[in-house]
Amino acid sequence: MRTFNFITIFPDLINNFLKYGLVNRAIEKKIIEINTIYLRDFSDDSNLRIDDKSYGGGPGMVMRYKPVEDALKSITRKSYVIYLSPHGSKLDQHKISELTKVQNLTFLCGRYEGYDQRVVDDLVDEQISLGDYVISGGELPSLILLEGITRLLPNVANDLDSILNDSFTDNLLDYPHYTRPESINGHEVPDVLLSGNHNEIAKWRRKQSLGITWKNRPDLLKNVKLSIEDDKLLKEYINESKENENK
Ligand code: SAM
């Protein structure tokens, strides 16, 4: 079974999330187990403090080394330690796939100004950032990683095909999806999706996927090796977009 350890001062934030969706299903099926570690249990302070003032002065408190070191020692199996931090490399689907190979992961959730730098230097294997912005804690970023990894694990999703078609698999964005009714305020479901012709539907979806990636995320397309058919579909999409713009 795959283990995810969370080191946090807000264990309820983590534990409440575990009641829902795919992550909950994976826990029930015993595909994953979660070990939420309350950092204050490892405080050596009578008021259970785990933070202190910053050397050099200035605003903001810093999370201390010793409680984290002791919390990590409580994990008996060998674990790969990730610190969710704006200083890390930016999370993407490739990184999430890579992490599905790791059996035991520990997420360090920061608060305040984050951890003493020596935690990062001595105790952390990798820093991962959600993106170029700052939020107040590492709990949400670590839950994003948990969900991203869990949904890729064998026997978790009911429909693995739908996951394999999701955005960023093969560096493309997903094609558009429609459901009933067929018409909403004059906006119709594309005819091809009602045709029952599976080849034509697959071709249309591929073309949309290529086209939407070209339109919204051209940076991703640079990493896609287009087949001759893909190239043709993308050119068609681009020409159709230009025609629509000129209408
Ligand atoms: N002083 C830090 C800085 O400016 O880089 C920000 C600390 S932030 C207020 C507190 C915690 O939130 C961090 O230690 C980290 O765990 C988490 N956090 C904030 N932004 C994040 C991001 N973009 N990615 C991952 N974790 C983040």
Image (cartoon, rainbow, N blue to C red):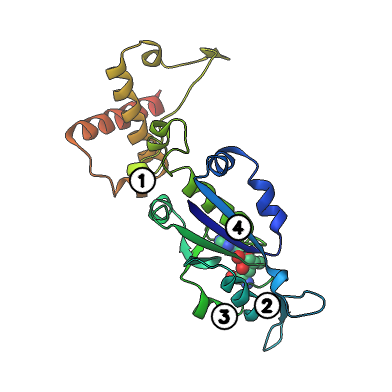
How far apart are the two marked residues, 1 and 4, measured between alpha carbons? 40 Å
**Between residues 139 and 20, which one lies in front from this camera angle?**
20
Q: Quadrant of residue 247?
A: top left
Q: Which sits earlier in the primary sequence, circle 3 or circle 4?
A: 4
Quadrant where ligand 1 appears = bottom right
Residue type beneath disc 1: Pro
**Residue at position x 55%, y 66% from top?**
85
Whether residue 133 can be seen here: no
Query: Disc 2 vs disc 1: which is toward the camera?
Result: 2
Task: Specify few, some or many for label 1: CA neighbours under 10 Å numbering under 14, 14-19, or 20 or more.
Answer: some
Measure how far apart labels 1 and 3 are at the Cα level.
37 Å
Residue under pointer 1: 218
Kindly identify the amino acid type of the residue bearing the numbered disc 4.
Asn
Sequence-earlier tag: 4 or 2: 4
Tell me the tag on residue 35: 4
Viewer-proximal residue among 120 and 11: 11
3D distance between C-alphas at marks 3 and 4: 25 Å
Q: Is mark 4 within 8 Å of ligand 1?
A: no
- The reply to whether the C-beta atoms of the residues labelled 1 and 3 are less than 8 Å apart is no
Going from N to C along the chain, the mark reached first, 2 or 3, is 2
Residue that appears at 46% across and 25% down: 177
